[in-house]
Image (cartoon, rainbow, N blue to C red):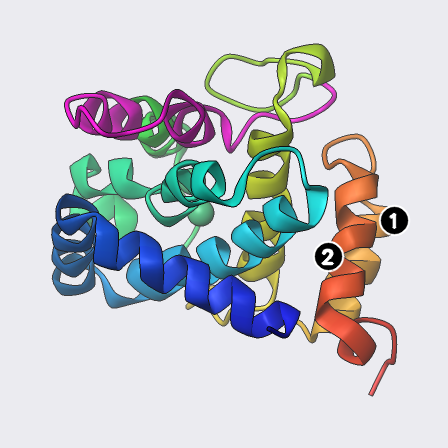
């Protein structure tokens, strides 16, 4: 099976095997469509990167990859006037928004089937290698491969998506930005694997 097909097939099989995850994702679809598409896109990219790393059996990848699908589920608890605010957030609003990893981990740890590594992805996807992320300011030593993968997939999808406050970057420009301005934050080995997965669109400025 081609690599892209494999990434999508894994995401679909997670959904088919876990009705609770599917229901949670459907409610996300109704709650905020942009958040839903972002979650699916991060999951497809993240699953491909995790498969590529070959650190765990494919059956475990499916369970851990739930963390990619549900990484932003905590945003359901953020007041909609903050979540959908078109302009810059105030410092107080930013602090509220930065609670979503803990909210998400709190919501999902009630699901007995969720894998510990999936929970960790939800809790740590905004941490950064230099310790400048949130909510715990964890540094490189404390960040798992799965959390680092989620951060790379999350940033790439955010940069290449249109938002009310910014246009979408092309894949090439997003990768350039990640390789030049985010070297302290993102694991550059994973960025290289992402380039490999994206193929020519990531390396040609057209
Ligand atoms: Fe997030
Ligand atoms: Fe995200």
- Give residue 201's position: percent from left, percent from top: 77, 79
Badge 2 local density, few (<14 within 10 Å), some, or many (20+)?
many
Relative to 4, say whether 57 is above or below.
Answer: above
Q: Secondary structure at mark 2?
A: helix
Extreme residue in the bottom direction: 206
Number of numbered callouts drawn: 2
Q: Secondary structure at mark 1?
A: helix
Q: Nearer the viewer, residue 24 or 113?
A: 113
The quarter holding residue 57 reads: top right
Question: At x 62% / y 19%, what residue is drawn?
Answer: 143
Q: Which residues are magenta?
A: 103-130
The quarter holding residue 95 reads: top left
- Give residue 25's position: percent from left, percent from top: 21, 54
Q: Which mark is residue 6?
A: none
Residue 85 shows up from this direction: no
Q: Which mark is residue 180?
A: 1
Q: Which mark is residue 194?
A: 2
Q: Is residue 201 magenta?
A: no
Mark nearer the N terminus (1 vs 2): 1
Q: Nearer the viewer, residue 65 or 175?
A: 65
Q: Nearer the viewer, residue 103 or 83?
A: 103
Q: Locate the C terminus by quadrant.
A: bottom right
- Give residue 135's position: percent from left, percent from top: 46, 18
105 sits left or right of 199 in the view: left
Numbered disc in front, either 1 or 2 = 2
Residue 109 shows up from this direction: yes
Q: Nearer the viewer, residue 60 or 29?
A: 60
- Give residue 187's position: percent from left, percent from top: 76, 36
Relative to 160, say whether 53 is above or below.
Answer: above
Question: At x 51% / y 22%, what residue is drawn?
Answer: 134
């Amino acid at each position: 099976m081609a690599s892209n097909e494999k990434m999508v097939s894994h995401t679909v099989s997670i959904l088919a095997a876990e009705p609770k995850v599917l229901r949670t994702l459907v409610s996300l679809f109704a709650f905020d469509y942009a958040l839903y598409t972002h979650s699916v896109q991060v999951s497809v990219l993240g699953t491909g990167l995790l498969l590529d790393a070959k650190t765990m059996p494919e059956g475990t990848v499916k369970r851990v990859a739930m963390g990619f699908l549900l990484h932003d589920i905590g945003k359901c608890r953020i007041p909609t006037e903050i979540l959908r605010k078109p302009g810059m957030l105030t410092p107080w609003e930013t602090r509220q928004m930065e609670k979503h990893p803990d909210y998400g981990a709190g919501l999902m740890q009630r699901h007995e089937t969720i894998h510990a590594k999936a929970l960790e992805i939800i809790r740590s996807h905004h941490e950064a290698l230099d310790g400048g992320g949130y909510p715990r300011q964890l540094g490189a030593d404390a960040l798992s491969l799965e959390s680092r993968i989620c951060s790379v997939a999350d940033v790439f999808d955010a940069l290449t998506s249109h938002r009310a406050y910014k246009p979408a970057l092309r894949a090439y420009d997003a990768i350039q930005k990640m390789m030049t301005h985010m070297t302290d934050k993102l694991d550059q080995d994973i960025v290289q694997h992402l380039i490999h997965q994206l193929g020519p669109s990531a390396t040609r400025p057209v």
